[in-house]
Structures are given as structure tokens and as C-alpha cells.
Amino acid sequence: MHDEGHVAVIDFGSQYTQLIVRRVRELGFFAMLYALEDFPNIGKPGAIILSGGPKSTSDADAPDLDFEALKAFEVPVLGVCYGMQLLNLKFGGTIEASDRREYGPANLFPEKAEGLYAGITKTSQVWMSHSDTVKIIPDCAEVIATNQHGTPVSLQWGERFFGIQFHPEVTHSHEGNRILSNFLSEARNLMPFRIEDFKREMIDNIRETVGDRQVVCGVSGGVDSTVLAVLLKEAGVKVRAIFVDNGLLRKNEAAEVQANFKRMGLEIETIDASDRFLDALAGEGDPEKKRKIIGNMFIEVFWDAVGDAQMLAQGTLYPDVIESASNAKSKASVIKTHHNRVAKILELQAEGKVLEPLAELFKDEVRALGTSLGIEESILMRHPFPGPGLSVRCPGVVDRERLDIIRDCDAIFIGKLKEHGWYDKVWQAYAGLIPVKTVGVKGDERSYEWATNLRAVVSEDAMTAEWVDLPAQLLRETSQKILNEVGGINRVLYDISTKPPASIEWE
Ligand code: XMP
């Protein structure tokens, strides 16, 4: 736990709170997110940021914090949106509640090109998302920036309390990083965030915690579990890496994962449990039941193989920790939580036998750690792949025939994305199956076959996603190749649905 000299971000519930933490880390300083209930138990921070939030300060249950405790830290404080309004109230000002929402871009007019606004362009675009505004500004405060209408959007109270109405953490605030960086330069002795230092610390911790016990970890071939396994190897502890083939993997995936690990000097134990999974799934068409069958079977197969574990390592990431703490859960994190919190694991946890070395890192930081561990770029840049595998890409019943068709279509699509230089530009892409038969013509004969859906999205955190405007030529070549080579398919569709309301997967 790093709790000295860090930037403590206090969560008032804004959807952007995690982004603030990420931005501060990108600027090279260590930041941690704290639930409001934990305040003031936030260690000895070097700076504090109060996040935005969905409530109005005039709500009966408006979130509040102990102002005397906040002042007692004697460090620079930045209030963002709700955080700014709360500070204004605390310093004796008022807030005007409003039902009208200002959402979108605004222009920033700093009073002086110094302090928070050193080097910031006049009229710089900032992103607004709020209803309430500050009304009475107390004598101790100074307006340090306004918007294009002359409305105050940034205040400073005394030497070290700052407030901004806009969101510097979103990319639509063009100079948001610079403003955050200016704020951080008000702080003294901030703890730097460097992945190399972090790696050394993690390795020392792992060695100390594990000693000569054997650590078991599950690997999927994905980024998190691969980095975890390599980190354990680097720490020189005894590792058993187990890979479960659930029969729902992509074309040649099991062989590729094995080959990848072999190149990295780490043997993995592969358990081919395809038959067990597919038999258990036979005839089941309900999405949630399918998920449950797969989840339970994974636990059964994995723990059968593990036997009595001395220690278990999990690739839990910081967003999982934050999300299970705040209960704001995405589907993926609920599922993960489900896997990571089974009785057996809780038991091991109580005995201090669960290791989660990546629990303070975001995904892109895990990638950076992977690079510094010498893991190949192609592994680190792999698209995410869901735990229930191809099952969620085949609505309704799954069987070997359907899975083989998906594998072939998917391999063609991914191959074309790579060939055209688009694989690294999209966040996730795949081909799925729509098991609905439609009429077509193949080689002078009537065909009556299924359709495949191609999906390619960009996303930051999987909570929202946009479909990618792929070049027509890429789609044309993919479609042609699928229609020529994959039996059972006579129609290729491109999914142009955003999330929400659609999800990335079809189930
Ligand atoms: P959806 O379909 O909910 O997917 O928009 C969001 C992201 O999560 C992945 N996903 C899962 N990952 N277990 C996982 O480990 C699951 O059950 C699961 N369902 C979806 C999906 O691939 C996408 O990246």
C-alpha cells in the first residue's frame, strides 16, 4: 500500500473519478482513489483532489466531508465540479441549485496566465457536466477563470485551495492535463510513479510473501494473467501456471498460448476440458444459464487440477478493486468478482494465501509492466477476450459445429484486420454467429445457411463503445473470403451498434 506522498482522489461518485487517478499517474505521480467513507483515513497525501459527483450540494443526502480534517492535511486541494461547489460552501459561499444541465464544451478565460493556468491558452476548450453553479463567492476567494459568458468557472480560496467547474480529466478538455500538472506543481514531495520502481518493489514483495512455497496461477493467454505469471517467474518463486481449455477458445488459441509461454521460458499445464464444458452446455440456450455453467465448470476443473494450493496468485487489477468497493459494477467485473470470490478463494484469503500483485495498477500500466518484463508487444496488445469465450458470440445453443464456424470466420476477420493495419487501432474485434438460416445462392444452387456478424469497437473501459468505421475494402475482402471458404455461412453482416444500448458481445 502506497500511502505517503501520493495524490489522494476522494470519490464523490462522478463517472470520471477513475480517469483523474489515471491522468495523475500519466503525469508521473502516484495517485490513489478513496471512497468518501474512508476520509480522512487516506494516509499522508502530498495533494488531495475532490472529485465531481451526481448529487447537488442542496440535496438532503448531499455527500459531505470533514472540512477541519481536510485543512489539517496542509496540502494543496483541488475541487473538481461537485468538489469545487463543496469547497465554496465550506469557505462560506453559496451554490445556486438548478435543474438545467450544462453538458459539453465551453471556453476558458483564465484571469492570469499563472498558477493553475500557467501556459494555458485563452479560450481553451474545457468540458462541462453540471447543473448547479457557484453563486456567492466568499471574501477569501478569488475568481481565477471564467467561461465565454463571464461566469466564474474556477476559484481559489487562500493559498492552496483551488476549484474548477469543468472536468480536466476528460480528453475534451484540451489542456486538462496541463491544468492538473500545474495544480500538482503546487505540492511538495509528491511520490513519483515509475513502472520500473514499481516492478522492483513488487518483485521484492512477492519474494518476501511467498518464500519457498509454491504459487499457483490460472493463465488465459490474456494480458493480465500473462504479466502476472511472468512477474512471478521473474521473482524467482516456484510457479505452477494452469491453462484451462474450455472448448470455447478461438482458432489455434490453445497451441498459440502454449507456444507464447514456452518462448518466455515458462511451462504451462494445459488441461483439455473441452468435452466437460461442451457436454455441460449441450442444449442450453439461455445466456445467463450458459454463463453459470461455464463459470461453475471452470471452478471445478481448475480446483481439481490445483489440489491443495499453498498460495494462489490472481491478476486482479485496480479497477476491479475500486469497482467491487464502490459497487458500481460492470458485467465483466461482476463475473470476475464471481470467479475471484468463490468460497475456496475466500478461505485461502483468510489464511493470507492469496497474492494479487497487480491490484494497484490500471490496464495500460499492466501493459507497461509487461513491456518492462520483456513480454512481446503482440501479446500485450491482444484484444480482450471474455472468460466464457465464444459462447457469448453464439446466441442460443452452442455446439462443436457452430464453434468451428465462428472460429473460421473470426480467424479470417482478424487476419484481414492485421493485414490492413487495423488490428491495433480497434479495441476489440471478432466474428460471431447468428444461427438463423436465410436463403442464398452458392454455385448455382440455392443455399439455406447461417449468417456471421463482424464486430469491431473502440472503447476506453468497456462501459461504453463505438463501432469502428472500417475501410470498405477490408470489409469486402473479409466478406468474400468468409463466403468462399466457410461452409455453413451465406451472409456476412457488420454490426453498427454503439454500447449502450447494445453490448459488445451478443450475450
Ligand atoms: P459487454 O458484452 O458487456 O462486454 O459489452 C464488455 C467487455 O467485457 C467482456 N466480457 C466478459 N469478460 N467474462 C469476462 O471475463 C464475461 O462473462 C464477459 N462478458 C463480456 C467483453 O468481451 C468486452 O470486452
Image (cartoon, rainbow, N blue to C red):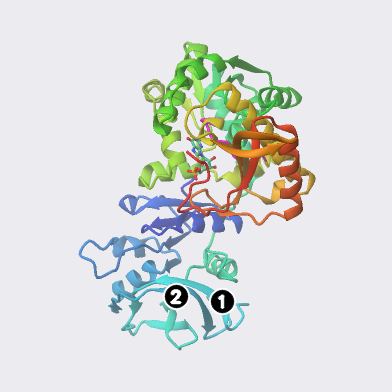
Task: Tell me the residue that label 2 is attached to.
Answer: 159
Task: Single out the mark in the foreground, 2 or 1.
Answer: 1
Are there few (<14), some (14-19), or many (20+) residues within 10 Å of tag 2? few
Task: Tell me the residue that label 1 is attached to.
Answer: 125
Q: Main secondary structure of the magenta part?
A: loop
Instruction: Please name whichever residue, 219 or 62, is drawn nearer the observer in this view of the structure.
Output: 219
Instruction: Please name whichever residue, 397 or 218, is drawn nearer the observer in this view of the structure.
Output: 397
Which residue shows up at 69% across the image and 51% down it? 425
In this image, 353 relative to 432: left or right? Answer: left
From the viewer's perspective, is residue 215 above or below residue 123? above
**Residue 428 visible in the picture:** no
Question: Residues in magenta?
Answer: 382-389
Residue 378 on the magenta span:
no
Which residue shows up at 73% across the image and 55% down it? 471
Displayed quadrant of residue 344: top left
Asked whether disc 2 touches disc 1, contact meaning CB atoms under 8 Å apart, the reply is no
Instruction: Please name whichever residue, 357 or 483, is drawn nearer the observer in this view of the structure.
Output: 483
Tell me which amino acid carries mark 1.
Answer: Gln
**Residue 144 visible in the picture:** yes
Q: Which mark is residue 1?
A: none
Displayed quadrant of residue 381: top right
Tell me which amino acid carries mark 2.
Answer: Glu
In this image, 407 relative to 463: left or right? Answer: right
Q: Secondary structure at mark 1?
A: strand
Q: Secondary structure at mark 2?
A: loop
Q: Position of residue 383 (x, y in %)?
A: 63, 41
Q: Position of residue 218 (x, y in %)?
A: 55, 24
From the viewer's perspective, is residue 39 above or below residue 101? above
